[in-house]
Amino acid sequence: MAPRKNFRNQAKKEVKPAAVVNKNGVKAEATVAASGGGFSSTKIFTWFMVLALLGVWSSVAVVWFDLVDYDNVIERAKEFRFNFSEVLQGKLSAYDADGDGDFDVEDAKVLLGLKERPVSVLLREAKEESAVKEPDDSRDEASHPYEDENDAIDMKGELVEKAQPQQTVEESKQYNDQPGSLKTKETVQLRYNAEAESVPEPEADVESVLEPEADVEPEVESVPELEAEFVPELKENAEEQPKDKLKEKAKKKKPKLLNKFEKTIKTEIDAAEKLRKKGKVEEAVRAFETLVLQYPQSPRCRYGKALAEDGLAEKMLSNDMLQKAIGTYKEASELPNATPDLIKATLKKRAERQQFLGRMRGALATLEKLVQIFPEDVALKNDLGVAHLLIGDNKSAKRVYEEVLATAPSDGFAKVHYGFILKSENKIAESIPFLRDGLESGDPGTDDGRFYFHLGDALQRMGDDSAYKWYERGHQRGHFASVWQRSLYNVDGLKAQPWWMPKDTGYMDLVKTLERNWRIIRDEAQSVMDKTTGLFVPEEENLREKGEWGQFTLWQQGKKAGESCRSVPKTCGLLERFPEAIGCKRGQIKFSVMQPGTHVWPHTGPTNCRLRMHLGLVIPKTGCKIRCTNDTRAWEEGKVLIFDDSFEHEVWQDADSYRLIFIVDVWHPELTQYQRQTLSPI
């Protein structure tokens, strides 16, 4: 090939094919012909087209210090539907991706996917799209009850129970550990972590907006015909109401989130909100940050920023980002000129997210502030009562629900919680009408397994067989696996049977070790039974109808009680090599001594994730028995009984001397190793 200078000289005199080689080595040939010493107009146009196109994209290559794949450019040009006549005329403003009024290198980067579009451009386009679709503000509100500013606002403020990733448990003994079950309902505060599966909060859309909780109509849930007698009659059927009444109700419920000034910037707010609703949370955060800078005194802009940060926290699984959102919610609620509805929505959301992080006292303070601002809102008072229960302050919760029932005596939510508290105080008979009436009301928040559980338990203790009708209803509602198996912390699909044979558990080595060494275990237990040592403590779960029942715990929730094991070192040493027992975070290992004249109420354990082994140590010849479902058995010294304590069981001790057993809880054999590691403790 001739040197470049020679090629240039020859091009003036001869007809030569000129070739342009792209990055991939593909030649694009332009045939040049001499006619009367010049180029034809058609070929001049061809050259101009090629050079114009290559000029645009080669400028990009120069900036990047790299060559451009022109095949890719051509495909992108097709993708973006470039108007090539505009290319030739230099009119590329239609492809101005960064909003600076021209087409340049930065625009090319955006179009090739190498750079994000600026927030200002996204906002502008969203505003333009909203302006096309947005009806005039003078429209009839009765016929358009929901406006754009409410489209994605969760006003309900419920603490959403989500699918359970790795958990940390924030529990009050009073609210979650009640008679009839060690823990009858897990109050689990999910924390973001690297292994957690994110369950995003549902996004409301234009057609469906959650309203303030106080105004929400109770949902009517289907009840099996078997339990039809329990279904409260509906006074109104929304579908049968005249349309004008429905519109009137919708207008009454509509939350007002914009103050007078914010209505003038509604289009800008809607544009940012649209990004959030589409799941573009990073862009939504930047958009709302821009709005907050422009309008620092706008509560709605700051509330939108908090919602966007909240969504980003979900996406990133970031506690830090969620804490930032909690702070922004607070800022929004404290700005002047915030509407009452926005204050309510903001603080409810803040309390919910504080509870999500397990910051119960912070959530309580937020709810107390809400009740001070809105003293007539019964739903907020009900939420405040729950917040007191979550930190174990039953006394304050009771006072709150008494106030609610004084002004709203038919409030089902307040009734079930008030009955729940009465039962925790062992006021069994008094608790029954509140629990029963609250469940029969069908009010939101009443259809909870805890309330079916405790109503049935209270009725059983009063000798009322209708308890099993309520257990059946709880089963039909999906709260219990069966009428007999009423645990509430369950893993689906595990084999369920009341009594187990040792060989069926897969833990034969453990069973044989216990039975071979039962005398050693018995002797150590008897050595610490002396009342002067105080090592055995009375059963504290209110499961006894009468008598004395003491326990001495060695492992609890998978954690060793070191001081206790020092008193019985041989027993603890025998167990150290059995992770199915000492690693069972949903169980205990303990001695149990029961004196004559003791009766334990029918009850169920909290979870189907464990099996319970009873090793007989000192067993009187007669008078001691245990029933699980409808099968009653007796202990034998040196032998292991195995049962699933998530099924109803009951114990009698009518002998003349004490009964001593060793209790060892083990993981359900069908649980995987991962489940054993990640299930929360009980």
Image (cartoon, rainbow, N blue to C red):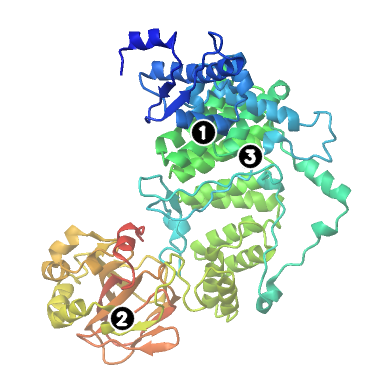
Residue at left 22%, top 83%?
618
Query: Which residue position holds label 3?
Result: 152
Q: Are marks 1 and 3 in contact (CB under 8 Å)?
A: no
Question: Residue 393: image x %, image y %?
Answer: 48, 49
Q: CA distance from mark 1 to mark 2?
A: 70 Å
Question: Residue 268: image x %, image y %?
Answer: 65, 24
First of labels 2, 3 by sequence position:
3
Query: Which residue position holds label 2?
Result: 642
First of labels 1, 2 by sequence position:
1
Which residue appears farthest toward the front when viewing the image?
36
Helix, strand or loop under label 1 = helix
2 vs 3, front mark = 3
> Dividing the picture into quarters, in which one does residue 467 lie?
bottom right
Reply above or below: 671 against 635: above
Q: Residues within 10 Å of mark 2 (few under 14, many from 20)?
A: many
Residue type, mark 2 in image: Ile
Residue type, mark 3 in image: Ala
Question: Residue 615: image x %, image y %?
Answer: 24, 80
Query: Which residue position holds label 1?
Result: 75
**In front: 24, or 670?**
24
Quadrant including the C terminus: bottom left
